[in-house]
Each structure stands twice: as structure tokens, then as C-alpha cells.
């Protein structure tokens, strides 16, 4: 009996390791669980790509493709993705194209569909219509590429609702959230080396793992730490990550006279993140919509993988109520979703959880169970396999 051959697919993710981002993690974790021989990945030559590609078994094709966010670079990126995708199509004869960005790689998917009749799917993460909607040209292209896609893959119900406003049929949408490796992220005792390195012994620890961007809400946590200092004299805020807001946040810590309570660790590789999650008493990320930075205005958290990582480590979480967080955090079960702009509510919620050990433990245990049951990467990969 003749065996059916596996479908050959091309993934154009946009972000992919060694780039550090939620999108890069999403595609890496899924594609490393798929057969490498039939699933090709087209990526830019990001810094450190040679070492990364040599260390993994994925079938990756690297080409020179600009990664800047400048308009000219985005246009060139789309053209080059299309050019290289056509070259690869002539050699591999793909059955499906997976487009990790709606405009740049979405153009490649649309063009190959028109030239070769190949179906393509587009992944969306939230806020694209806000960021590109100010340009009639970008919005019309966004709508064109999505309209012709076989499927649109949003990362949350909130993101799907955003794109439904473009009058796209609901039948095109298949929500596939990010996931978490529950064998890598799991509860364990606080790491002694880290406790000593950051002088955290005897401290009550709030933790945020995220890029230092406006929409992540680090500044509001700092204001809460300042307000709660008298009630919790050992309260410390541990910030894992780097980004454009670091200088402003350090200045704010000084202005609030809490610089000694706020620790910036900088970048931490994924392999070490469980050690940091397991240090904290509470994980907090007060996500909100970007308003002051004109480059990112309208940007928001489409899901939030870090909430799953914290939950998988058995930690209760506090999240902001804007974006796709309701898919990542079950309010009152695995964590609490609150108004990220209401300082009184933030302080009251932190205080409530810090004073109630049993409640924190219940939330953390439920979060771990939920992560294992619904969000392990093996479960998410099965959903992707259904549309390959």
C-alpha cells in the first residue's frame, strides 16, 4: 500500500529565533514539534543566526532581508519575502504557505496564491488594524491579503474581534493561542544563587517578565510599590527584560524614591526564565494600550505568553484588562484581571494577595493545572497540524 506523503509547507514567520519575542517563541515551539523534512522556514539573517541554526534540526533558509521598522524597509521586506518564496516554490512545490505577518509575508502568501494557486494562512496578534489603519493604502492591502487567505489565525478572541471589523467572514478565523512548555516551566524552590545575586533573601517579590515598553505597565507597578512601601517594607519589584523604556523607568524609580526596591535584570534567556518565575510571590503585568509613543500608538497585548509561563510555575498573576488577556488568564481562577490605570485598584489587589497566602496558592495551583490541560505546546501543535 502506497503511503501518502507529508504536505510540504513554507513558514515565513517574521520573528524567529535567535530573535527574542512572543511571535518568535510561538513559531519555534510549534515548528520544532513538526516534521522538519516537510516544513521549511524562511527567515532573515538576524544576529546570531549561524549558531542558532547549527544547534537545531529545523529546516531553515536564511536570506538577507531587512528587519528595520522603517516604511521603506517594510516594503523591501515584503518584496524580498515574495522573491525568495517564489524561488523556493520552484524547488519544493509547497502545498501551504504560513504567513507570520499580515503585510510583509502576507504579500508573499497572496502572490504565490495568485501565481501557483497555493493556499495560505495568515497569523495576527492584535493591534495591526490600529497601527496600519491610519494609512488607507496599508489598510486596503491588509484587507486584501486577509480576504484571500484560506484561514486567519488570531491569538485570542479579542484579536479576532478586532479583525472582524474589516468585514471578513467569521468562518475564516481559527483561534490558536500561544502555549507553554509545562515540562520546562514548573514549580520549584527559589534558586539560591539568584536570591544571593540580587539580595532577595527575606524579600516579598513582584515580578514582571516583558520588554520595557509603554504598554507593559511597569510604571504603574512602580507607583504601587511606592504606595505600599509602609505596609510591606520588604516589597521588591524584579523586572526581567530590556527595551526602549528602561531609561525612563529608572528615572521614575528614582523620582518615587524606590530605586533600591526595583531591580532591572536585563535580558534573560528562555532557558533561565523558570528560575526567575520561581523567585516571585506574585507575577504582575499591567498591560494596556500604547498611547504616548507615536510609533506604536494603538498597540496592545494580544495574548501574553508570560502569563502562561508564570502560571505553569504555579504563580498567581495580576493582569491588565485590555487586550486578549481573558484567553491567557481566567479571572478569579488562575489570576486577577484589573484596571491597569486605576492605582487604587492595583494597590488593593496586590495587598489582598500578599496578605492571603491560601488564596495565592489556590490561584497558582489552578494556573498550573490550566496550563497543563489547555496550553501545553503539544496541544497547540495539534491544532496547527489540522490546518497544515
Image: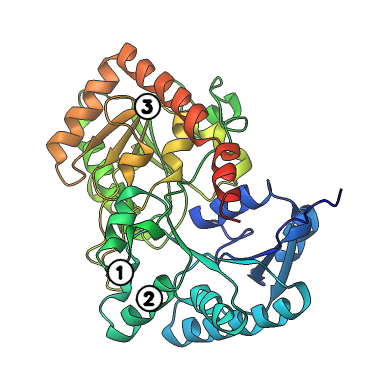
Q: Earlier in the sequence, mark 1 or mark 3?
A: 1
Q: Nearer the viewer, residue 169 or 277?
A: 169
Which residue is depicted at the point 27% across and 22% down?
353
Q: Earlier in the sequence, mark 1 or mark 2?
A: 1
**Which of the labelled discs sits on residue 316, or is there none?**
3
**Which of the labelled discs sits on residue 14, or is there none?**
none
Q: Nearer the viewer, residue 125 or 193?
A: 125
Which residue is depicted at the point 46% across and 48% down?
176
> Which residue is labeled 2 in the image?
142
Question: Label 3 to label 2, Cα distance in Å?
Answer: 38 Å
Q: How is the image coloured?
A: rainbow
The answer to whether residue 370 is above or below residue 72 is above
Q: Secondary structure at mark 1?
A: helix
Question: Label 1 to label 2, Cα distance in Å?
Answer: 8 Å
Query: Is residue 68 at all visible to an observer of this figure?
Result: no
Q: Secondary structure at mark 2?
A: helix
Q: Quadrant of residue 193?
A: top right
Which residue is depicted at the point 56% across and 77% down?
113
Q: Answer with left or right where residue 257 lies relative to residue 65.
A: left
Query: Is residue 265 at all visible to an observer of this figure?
Result: yes
> Which residue is labeled 1 in the image?
129
Residue count near mark 3 (Cα–Cα under 10 Å), binned few <14, some 14–19, many ≥20: many
Residue count near mark 2 (Cα–Cα under 10 Å), binned few <14, some 14–19, many ≥20: many
Q: Position of residue 121 (x, y in %)?
A: 51, 64
Q: Residue furthest top?
A: 358
Discs 1, 2 touching: Cβ within 8 Å: yes
Q: Quadrant of residue 4?
A: bottom right
Amino acid at each position: 500500500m502506497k503511503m501518502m506523503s507529508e504536505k510540504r509547507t513554507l513558514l515565513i514567520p517574521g520573528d524567529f529565533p535567535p530573535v527574542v519575542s512572543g511571535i518568535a517563541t510561538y513559531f519555534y515551539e510549534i515548528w520544532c514539534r513538526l516534521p522538519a523534512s516537510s516544513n521549511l522556514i524562511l527567515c532573515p539573517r538576524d544576529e546570531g543566526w549561524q549558531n542558532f541554526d547549527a544547534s537545531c534540526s529545523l529546516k531553515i533558509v536564511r536570506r538577507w532581508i531587512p528587519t528595520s521598522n522603517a516604511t521603506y524597509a517594510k516594503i523591501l521586506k515584503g518584496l524580498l519575502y515574495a522573491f525568495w518564496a517564489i524561488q523556493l516554490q520552484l524547488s519544493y512545490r509547497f502545498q501551504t504557505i504560513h504567513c507570520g505577518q499580515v503585510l510583509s509575508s502576507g504579500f508573499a502568501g497572496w502572490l504565490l496564491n495568485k501565481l501557483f494557486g497555493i493556499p495560505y494562512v495568515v497569523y495576527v496578534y492584535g493591534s495591526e488594524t490600529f497601527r496600519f489603519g491610519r494609512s488607507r493604502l496599508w489598510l486596503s492591502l491588509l484587507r486584501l491579503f486577509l480576504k484571500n487567505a484560506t484561514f486567519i489565525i488570531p491569538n485570542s478572541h479579542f484579536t479576532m474581534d478586532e479583525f472582524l471589523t474589516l468585514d471578513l467572514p467569521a468562518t475564516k478565523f481559527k483561534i490558536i493561542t500561544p502555549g507553554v512548555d509545562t515540562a520546562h516551566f514548573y514549580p520549584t524552590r527559589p534558586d539560591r544563587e539568584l536570591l544571593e545575586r540580587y539580595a532577595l533573601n527575606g524579600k516579598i517579590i513582584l515580578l514582571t517578565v516583558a520588554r520595557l515598553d509603554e504598554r507593559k505597565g511597569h510604571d504603574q507597578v512602580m507607583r504601587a510599590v511606592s504606595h505600599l512601601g509602609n505596609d510591606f517594607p520588604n516589597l521588591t519589584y524584579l523586572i526581567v527584560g530590556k527595551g526602549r523604556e528602561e531609561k525612563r523607568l529608572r528615572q521614575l524609580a528614582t523620582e518615587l524614591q524606590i530605586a533600591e526596591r526595583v531591580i532591572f535584570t536585563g535580558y534573560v534567556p528562555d532557558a533561565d526564565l523558570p528560575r526567575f518565575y520561581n523567585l516571585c510571590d506574585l507575577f504582575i503585568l499591567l498591560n494596556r494600550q500604547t498611547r504616548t509613543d507615536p510609533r506604536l500608538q494603538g498597540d496592545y497585548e494580544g495574548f501574553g505568553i508570560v502569563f502562561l509561563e508564570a502560571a505553569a510555575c504555579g504563580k498567581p498573576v495580576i493582569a491588565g484588562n485590555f487586550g486578549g488577556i481573558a484567553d491567557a488568564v481566567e479571572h478569579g481562577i488562575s489570576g486577577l484581571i484589573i484596571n491597569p490605570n486605576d492605582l487604587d485598584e492595583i494597590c488593593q489587589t496586590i495587598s489582598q494577595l500578599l496578605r492571603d497566602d491560601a488564596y495565592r496558592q489556590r490561584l497558582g495551583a489552578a494556573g498550573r493545572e490550566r496550563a497543563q490541560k489547555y496550553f501545553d505546546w503539544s496541544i497547540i501543535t495539534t491544532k496547527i497540524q489540522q490546518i497544515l
